[in-house]
Amino acid sequence: MIKIEKLSKVFRTEEVETKALNDITLQIKQGEFVTIMGASGCGKSTLLNIIGLLDGASGGSYKLLDKEINGLSEGEKARIRKENIGFVFQNFNLIDELSVYDNIELPLIYNNVPSAERKKRVEAIAERLGISHRLKHYPQQLSGGQQQRSAVARALVNDPKIILADEPTGNLDSKNGNEVMELLTDLHASGATILMVTHSDYDASFSQRTIFMKDGMILNEKQNSRNVDVLITS
């Protein structure tokens, strides 16, 4: 599903050149649940943004669903992003002035889905995530866990091929954080492909494998099991 080869990202100012990603090579297969870990500034969020088509690479190859992404126009990237990728953010990124229903509905409006179909999809995903009784509420009327469930519903309502989660439990207490991780586990079990960035070893343990980054490079990766960990060095 995702194939990255010798990917690089350089940020330049008039005085400084910073290499955020250095020859990253990575593959993620359909149906995998993969975590990226590393200290702040290691490049993991930059990599996630490139995979999510929110930023572009400086060099190398990035193929999504066998299509080369580097070199595409911003319009083409936006179309591919809308059709294939769902985002879950640490800060939820819900719009406070809109109800939960309206927040979840937004991606469908952007994709020109007819009104009746939008209503059907919003209600179905809300029921699946246990927030049907909150659709008329506003984000600030919800608990942190309910806000993140609403954000996950918004990410899933277009039936994306891949879910990108950036510190999805970062602003939650342990109880609500665990609920979100159980939710992501259920989504993975139903066939979702998930790539998650986290600082939490506990959250990473829910995934199938963990990739460790440092200074813009991949150091190694570990196959995850709740009982047995096998370290694979690159």
Image: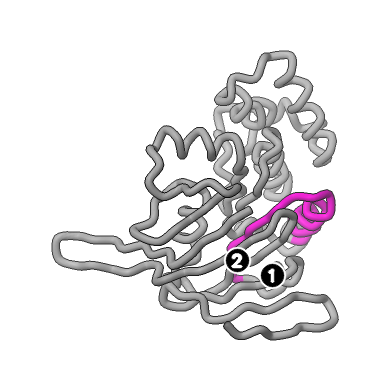
Depth check, front residue: 40 or 27: 27
The amino acid type of the residue labelled 1 equals Ala
Numbered disc 1: secondary structure = helix
- Asked if the stretch drawn in magenta spans residue 209, the answer is no
Q: Residue at x 59, y 68 (%)?
A: 36
Crowd rating for badge 1 (residues with CA inside 10 Å; few <14, some 14–19, many 20+): many
- Asked if the stretch drawn in magenta spans residue 182, the answer is yes
Numbered disc 2: secondary structure = loop
The region drawn magenta spans 178-199
Q: Which mark is residue 175?
A: none
Q: Residue at x 56, y 59 (%)?
A: 3
Q: Sequence-wise, which precedes: disc 1 or disc 2? A: 2
| Cβ atoms at labels 1 and 2 below 8 Å apart | yes
Disc 1 target residue: 204
Crowd rating for badge 2 (residues with CA inside 10 Å; few <14, some 14–19, many 20+): many
Image quarter of residue 136: top right
Percent across and percent down for residue 110 are: 55, 25
State how far apart marks 1 and 2 are (Cα): 7 Å
Disc 2 target residue: 198
